[in-house]
Image (spheres, helix red, strand yellow):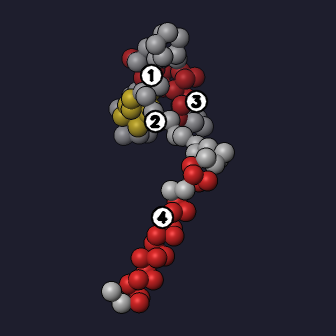
Amino acid sequence: MDYRAFCCYVYLGIIASFLFSEGCASSSKQVPTISQPTGSYHEVQKGETVWSIARSYQREVPEIVEANKLPDPSKLTVGQFLYIPRRDSSGDR
């Protein structure tokens, strides 16, 4: 093994020991988690409104408007995808 390869292995060993040391594992920093959507998506068809879509999924209009951050719910585009939030297990939302 030549000197250059030896130095690379030593360097990688130092990095690995730093990454897997207890000091790193016991850090008080918490990694944020990103929740995955649990609802479904609906592709807007010609003539549909937020109200008609909400009704077909048994949802309230404000739920769909809020979930999709719609600035103007009266302006949907054919082919636009809307996120439809899933009802929770208690049936409240």
Q: Distance from label 1 to label 3 (Cα)?
A: 13 Å
Height in image: 37 above or below 11?
A: above
**Which SS class for mark 2?**
loop
Label 2 neighbour load within 10 Å: few <14, some 14-19, many 20+: few
Q: Distance from label 2 to label 4 (Cα)?
A: 31 Å
Relative placement, left or right, of 73 versus 10 is right
Q: Which mark is residue 36?
A: 2
Q: Are marks 1 and 4 in contact (CB under 8 Å)?
A: no
Q: Are marks 2 and 4 in contact (CB under 8 Å)?
A: no
Q: Distance from label 1 to label 4 (Cα)?
A: 43 Å
**Which SS class for mark 1?**
loop
Q: Earlier in the sequence, mark 2 or mark 1?
A: 2
What residue is disc 1 on?
86
> Mark 2 is on which residue type?
Gln
Residue 51 lies, in percent from the top left, at 48, 20
**Which residue is depicted at the point 44% across and 22% down?**
86
**In this view, the mark in front (1 or 3):** 1
Between 59 and 73, the one lying in front of the other is: 59
Q: Are marks 4 and 3 in contact (CB under 8 Å)?
A: no
Q: Earlier in the sequence, mark 2 or mark 4?
A: 4
Q: Which mark is residue 16?
A: 4
Q: Quadrant of the N terminus?
A: bottom left
Q: Which mark is residue 66?
A: 3
> Mark 4 is on which residue type?
Ala
- The image quadrant of residue 83 is top left
**In this view, the mark in front (2 or 1):** 2
Between 41 and 26, the one lying in front of the other is: 26
Height in image: 87 above or below 68?
A: above
**Which SS class for mark 4?**
helix
Q: Earlier in the sequence, mark 1 or mark 3?
A: 3
Q: Earlier in the sequence, mark 1 or mark 4?
A: 4
Between 46 and 11, the one lying in front of the other is: 11
